[in-house]
Image (cartoon, rainbow, N blue to C red):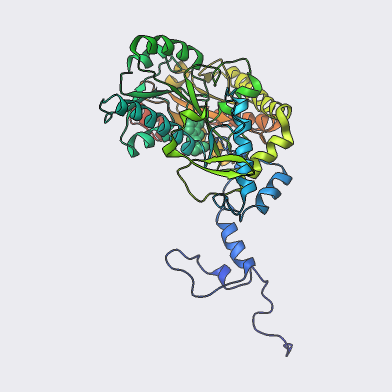
Amino acid sequence: MTDPNFRSGDAKSNVFGTDEMISPSPVQTIPDGPTTEDVAYQMVKDEIFAETDPRLNLATFVTTYMDEKATQLMNEAININYIDETEYPRVAFMAAKCINIVANLWNTPEQNKWKAGAVAIGSSEACMLGGIAAWIRWRERRKAAGKPYDKPNFVISSAYQIVWEKFAQLWEIEMRTVPLSLEKTTLDPEEALKLCDENTFCIVPIQGVTYTGLNDDVEALDKALDEYNAKTGYDIPIHVDAATGGFILPFLFPETKWDFRLKWVLSISTSGHKFGLVYPGLGWVCWKDKKYLPGSMSFSADYLGAEVTQVGLNYSRPAAQILGQYYQFIRLGFQGYKEVQTNSMDVCKYLHSEIAKRPAFVNYSDDVPNPLFIWYLKPEYQATAKWTLYDLQGKLQEHGWMVPAYALPNNLENYVVMRVVCKQGFSRDMADQLLGDIDSAVAEMEKLEYPTESRIAMEKNIPLKSTFNHTGR
Ligand SMILES: *Cc1c(COP(=O)(O)O)cnc(C)c1O
């Protein structure tokens, strides 16, 4: 007997029993009608459900863990548009306070209460802003001197992050690269200067090179550049791309001179969403002094007597990240940041030393200046091995780990390396689990009878592309 009050559909749960959950998701056209919020939530959530936990993503540099209060704070601010600064002046004010804090971490000599800087969506936008400012300053100088300004160039190592290629292409600027070698693993100042001329508007050393984790020696570059500028009168400045290092060096290596303490460092950019410990997307760029930020790039607003300068490529942008950054500054303080970064470094150094003990592997560098490092297969091991690091990447992926294998940039393109970035949320215990998975994968691959596809490709000199984006996001 059926219940006379029972209506068709009553037995279905309000989510998984619905027609939507047995229908394909929309691909081309908007659905005809609405559905419930529970169903819409479930469908969208499930589409990415099978993908690994971001905390197992050792490829990314970007924050994958924040505490609950920070997450709550950011979620609550999700409907605030940063650009509405006349409606939400406190948000712009908060951003200006963050710029002050960042500039002071980088030892700015600026005496103004409000330091020159800008909030960005990430280092990409921050790098662009630093680069554009240097380009405009050079252009203005050339114009004033009645000299041509149609062939600008900048100098960087071949291990640059992809944003610099974008910068060069979009603005039609020549990018001159200094190749790296196994002996010269970072930007060589003398080689960089050989590429400079009167059309060079800046040199860009990197702190936390995405390919290797190493730091270019900014102090040595500054010294060499000082002599060069005195000799040539070119006054070429430095923009430091400190996407990673900008939030590592001030806490872990405060003695190292890489920042505004150096004469020719006029601007620095970093990612708030990397070791600034905020969810994406957030970046910062600061100038040594207001006078290095061309007026044509900025517009100013007065708030409570504070001059808040706004510079950016994007107009609307989320405010939540700024709240997240300011929260982290207050929540952690200098000591807290230092402890978090120390832990990331300790886990990283532990992995680094363990990898060195494995007979198959050799570390690219003994130096671990940032919480990431790369290693490769010992050439004598690779010679007889039937597998490559691309295969290891695949094996680790089966356990949920995202650990990228990729080839180094030109000159070193025959070196296939593997990289881990150790962030907050990656514990010593997780490092041990990763090592266990690496060891069992290697043991399994050592039993292979025939070479893998990637090993055959390597033999034939067919370049392989990494399936993970390793360019450092
Ligand atoms: C990550 C990175 C960038 C780009 O930064 P986003 O924050 O991803 O926009 C630029 N330069 C370097 C050295 C990086 O590591």
- Locate residue 329, reporting x and y percent: 69, 35
Q: Quarter of the image holding residue 247?
A: top right
Q: Can residue 263 be seen in the rendering of this structure? A: yes
Nearest the eye: 148 or 447: 148
Q: Vertically, is 320 above or below 286?
A: below
Nearest the eye: 94 or 147: 147
Residue at point 62%, 67% (across, down): 37
Residue at point 56%, 36% (across, down): 396
Nearest the eye: 171 or 404: 171
Q: Can residue 448 be seen in the rendering of this structure? A: no
Residue at point 59%, 29% (across, down): 112
Nearest the eye: 275 or 360: 275
- Locate residue 136, reporting x and y percent: 38, 32
164 left or right of 443 in image: left
- Locate residue 3, reporting x and y percent: 74, 88
147 left or right of 110 in image: left
Q: Quarter of the image holding residue 324?
A: top right
Say which quadrant the N terminus sits in. Answer: bottom right
- Locate residue 95, reporting x and y percent: 60, 41
